[in-house]
Structures are given as C-alpha cells and as structure tokens.
Image (cartoon, helix red, strand yellow):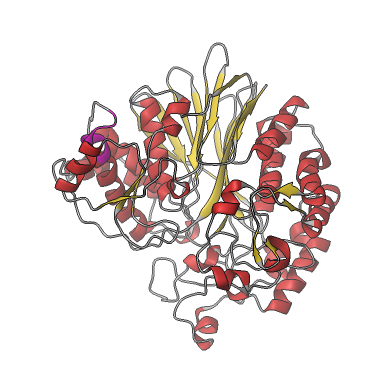
C-alpha cells in the first residue's frame, strides 16, 4: 500500500527516516530547504552507508522562489596518477571494482555542500554549520541501528568487498554482515564530521582532513593525491530543460544521464498514450528508454569534452523524428553498452518560501570501493570504474577527467504554479523511474503517493543483473505482461511487490496559491517524508 503523503507548508523526503527527521529539524529551526538538505546529506551518509557517503559525489538542482533553477556539479575527477598505462602495467583489462585501485576519483560531495550552502546564505540562510551537521555527528558517535535495507542487501563481489582495507572493522559484525537493528558506531567518521563542522567544509580538500585522506590514499596505493584534493572545486552548471505539455522539466547535464531522462519523457509525450497501466503505456516507456539510452551511450561524457551541445537532442525536431521511429506494435532491439550498477540516495526538500531542492548523493556500487580510510573513517567511492581503459572509448580514463554518472536530480515547474522535486536511485533505472513516477502524476492524474508506490519496470541492467530483459515487479496486470511478451519484449518477473533494485523514489509537489506541499518517499526504502 502507498504511504500516506505528508501535507505541509515545508517538507522533506528521504530514503531513511533519520535523514528526513534531520531535514525537518533544520526547517523547524528556521533553516531553508538547502540548509535542510545539507543536514540530510550528512545524516544519510552515516545511516545509509551501503548507498552513499562523504567519500562520494553529489548533484544538486535548486529552484529559487522567483523561478531561477541552478545546478551544482559535485563530482570529482580522476586522480593525477589514474592513467591507462598505470592500469595496463598492473595487468588490468578493466579498472578493478573494489579496493584502492577502484578509488580512482576525488570525492566531490562535500564540495557540493559548500557551494550549495553559499547559495543558501545568499538566499537568507543563517544556520551555522555545526547545527547542520549535529544529527550526523551524533548518529556516528552514539550509534545508529543498521537499516533493514542494508541488512537485506547482498552486494556484488561480496568476498572481495569484505576483504578491503578497513571494511570489516567499519561494517561487519564478527566478519559477517550486520543484522537489521544492530547498533553501529562510526567514531572516526564522527570525528571527521565534527572537524568539518568547526573548521569548515574546505578542510576536506585543503586542511587537516585533506592531509589525513591523502596520507591514507597514498599508503594504500590509490591514484588520488593531496594535490588532486586541493585543486578540486564543485561547479555551478546550467540545467538541461525540456518544455513538455503544461510543464518545464529540468535535469542535469553531462557527465550525468539527465539527458536520457528528458529524452524519455519527450518521446513518451509524443506517443499520445491516453491510458495508464496499459500495454501501450509500458511499451511506450520501454521503447522511449531504448532510444534515449542509444543517445546517452554515444554522447554523454565529461562536460568539458562534449561533442556539441546536448540540448540539440531535446529539440522538437529531433524528438519528433525519434518518436516516429517507435513501432507501437513491436519491440525494437537497441543494445545498451554501459553497465548499470549504482547505489545512490535521492532526497528532496521544499521550504515555506517555495525554495525547492532535488539532490542525489552516491558512492556508485554498494559501499563504493570498499576501502575505509582509517584516519577519517571515510569509505571511498568507486565511481571511476565507469571509465574505460580503451583510449578511443567515449569515457576513457585520464587524469582530471570526470567519469560518466548515473546520478540525476530532477525538478519540474508547471504552468499552474505547481513545483515538483522528484527522483530515484537505481543506476540505469534512474531516468526510467523518473519517467514512470512523473508521467503517472502529471499525465494520468495519480496522487504523489500512488505515483511513487505503483509497480515499476526496468529495461536493461542494474545492480549486477546482466540481462537486457524488462524486469517487472508483481502487481502488473498479467494480461499486459503476456501482451508485452507477444510484442517481442523479454520479460523477467522478479517475484516481489516492492523490489529494491527498482528504485527508492520520492516526490514533493508544492501547489500555488495556498503553498501546500504534498511529499512522499518510497515504501521500498526505509525512509519517508516529514513536514511542518
């Protein structure tokens, strides 16, 4: 059953209830939506470590009350020692998935917090950093119960993960995964967060924390150096924009797959499918996804190395031509080239002034590289494993280059004044899940909770599933499944009503006039929505 949505004048949504509570607390103290999100980002890094951490990256979309939308790119580039010859000389055909050699890139998330909080201050935010990080510090120091999501999760390459430096001490119980409800303390991470609270977030890249991070990475043989940390800064990016029906949609530009998310919705709009939860509805989403991913896989790379303007793929003429190529009676075969693994958190916040935030934070695979730095307690991402060791690839490894990202926050502004913050975790699934929940709400009139609760499908790979089948939860009409199979779709029934690998999504909608906000988060996660 769908969760009951929150109705409030200010609200947050997150995949762990403690992160949502942290955001609510900041709103109650007079903080704005950006300040609330910073508190949530810090807290979720402690309480949901299999999905994210401060050793990872993040992307922000922020809509100011006046309508301006800003993007913050907080993804770290490959380290100065991360070269193709280095990995080839070590005998690697691909970048390792775990261990110090998987810790390829600088962690950008903290830099994004800093840039976002500068914007929060410009918009009237006044809460001090110690107040924003207080809940995260307390949970890391005093301990927090291991979540059901983490306990039921079986990571890829489990034995390799468990063998990584520092992993067992931080995340295992007598050498085994922790059961749900076990109290976990992370004292080194608590000390790091406390240092950041009092020394400032720049300390992560230029101060004492940076020195400790660099020393540990060097000792372990990772390719990220002190100089790489010192030179890093998050950047503001203009979002990608799609005009669709009665709304303007915003998503993140490369190196993320936000382009694919907007192409899917642009193509689906043109198919003029008038009824939800039908064979045509599902087929249209799947076929739009195939065409969007074909563009993504040949085009999306580091923003500074793009072959042209990505907005050309959102041009009405391009979308018209692509939609016309979709056969509504038959499944097309368009193979994907990029792996779709990725474990992530999406969170949203809208305050009483209408400032709206959509934010996503990740360490890529579950627990990232698996490496936990002993001096700081930070577990480092493995986002750089998305690089190729083929210099002719779309995303080849080279120092200073940003990797391809599945991470995509989303916003929408409707002509009637409604503002939506929405998104999901889930690798290749993220643009698909965004399209499913958005279209159910905007095109077919579902409420926010029903749109997020409704059964989902996924075309392609995610979380280690290597097949290119269409994966479906229970609760789909069996007749629709049979019809999709008859059209040539390979359907894989996952055997559950609420499957983690089909995303932890959330949605907040602020209505014009009375300023009422409807907010919900996924029943597939351990979170929810909170409001004032």
Residue 179 against residue 238 in the figure, above or below? below
The quadrant of the image that shows the C terminus is top right
Q: Is residue 146 left or right of residue 471?
A: right
Residue 191 % position (x, y): 83, 55
Question: Does the magenta-highlighted stretch encompass residue 281?
Answer: yes
Q: Quadrant of residue 415?
A: top left
- Per the rendered image, the range of residues in magenta is 276-282
Residue 144 in sight here? yes
Residue 148 % position (x, y): 59, 47
Task: Give me the residue at 56% from left, 59% from top.
Answer: 366
Residue 393 against residue 413 in the figure, above or below? below
Residue 399 in sight here? no
Between 398 and 505, the residue placed more toward the observer is 505
Q: Is residue 362 left or right of residue 38?
A: left
Task: Give me the residue at 64% from left, 28% from top.
Answer: 530
Q: Is residue 204 left or right of residue 528?
A: right
Residue 53 against residue 376 in the figure, above or below? above
Between 455 and 92, the residue placed more toward the observer is 455
Question: Does the magenta-highlighted stretch encompass residue 226?
Answer: no
Q: Quadrant of residue 326?
A: top left
Between 99 and 292, the residue placed more toward the observer is 99
Residue 363 % position (x, y): 58, 57
């Amino acid at each position: 059953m769908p969760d009951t949505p929150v109705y409030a004048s200010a609200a947050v949504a997150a995949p762990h209830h403690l992160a949502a509570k942290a955001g609510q607390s900041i709103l109650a103290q007079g903080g704005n939506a950006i300040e609330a999100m910073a508190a949530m980002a810090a807290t979720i890094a402690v309480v949901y470590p299999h999905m994210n951490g401060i050793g990872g990256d993040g992307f922000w979309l922020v809509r100011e009350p006046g309508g301006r939308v800003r993007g913050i790119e907080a993804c770290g580039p490959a380290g100065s020692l991360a070269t193709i010859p280095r990995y080839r000389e070590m005998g690697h055909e691909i970048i390792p998935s775990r261990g110090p050699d998987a810790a390829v890139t600088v962690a950008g998330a903290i830099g994004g917090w800093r840039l976002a909080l500068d914007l929060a201050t410009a918009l009237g935010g006044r809460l001090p950093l110690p107040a924003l990080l207080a809940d995260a510090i307390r949970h890391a120091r005093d301990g927090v119960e291991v979540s059901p999501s983490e306990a039921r999760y079986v990571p890829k390459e489990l034995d390799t993960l468990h063998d990584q430096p520092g992993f067992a001490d931080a995340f295992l119980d007598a050498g085994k995964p922790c059961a749900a409800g076990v109290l976990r303390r992370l004292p080194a991470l608590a000390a790091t967060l406390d240092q950041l609270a009092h020394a400032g977030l720049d300390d992560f890249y230029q101060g004492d924390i940076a020195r400790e991070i660099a020393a540990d990475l060097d000792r372990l043989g990772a390719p990220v150096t002190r100089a790489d940390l010192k030179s890093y800064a998050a950047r503001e990016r203009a979002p990608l924009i799609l005009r669709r029906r009665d709304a303007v949609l915003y998503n993140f530009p490369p190196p993320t797959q936000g382009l694919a998310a907007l192409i899917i919705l642009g193509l689906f709009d043109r198919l003029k499918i008038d009824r939800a939860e039908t064979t045509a509805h599902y087929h249209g989403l799947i076929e739009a996804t195939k065409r969007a991913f074909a563009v993504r896989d040949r085009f999306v790379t580091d923003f500074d190395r793009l072959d042209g303007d990505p907005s050309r793929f959102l041009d009405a003429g391009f979308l018209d031509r692509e939609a016309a190529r979709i056969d509504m009676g038959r499944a097309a075969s368009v193979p994907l080239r990029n792996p779709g693994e990725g474990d992530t958190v999406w969170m949203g916040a809208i305050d009483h002034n209408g400032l709206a935030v959509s934010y996503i934070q990740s360490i890529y695979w579950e627990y990232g590289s698996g490496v936990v730095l002993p001096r700081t307690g930070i577990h480092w991402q493995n986002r750089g494993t998305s690089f190729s060791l083929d210099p002719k690839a779309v995303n080849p490894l080279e120092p200073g280059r940003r990797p391809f990202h599945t991470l995509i926050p989303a916003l929408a502004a409707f002509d009637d004044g409604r503002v939506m913050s929405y998104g999901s975790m889930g690798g290749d699934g993220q643009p698909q899940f965004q399209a499913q929940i958005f279209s159910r709400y905007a095109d077919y009139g579902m409420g926010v909770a029903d749109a997020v609760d409704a059964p989902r499908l996924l075309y392609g790979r995610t979380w280690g599933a290597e097949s290119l089948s269409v994966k479906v939860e229970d609760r789909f009409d069996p007749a629709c499944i049979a019809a999709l199979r008859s059209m040539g779709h390979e359907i894989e029934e996952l055997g559950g009503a609420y499957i983690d690998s089909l995303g932890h999504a959330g949605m907040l909608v602020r209505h014009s006039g009375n300023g009422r906000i409807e907010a919900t988060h996924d029943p597939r996660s351990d979170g929810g929505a909170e409001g004032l």
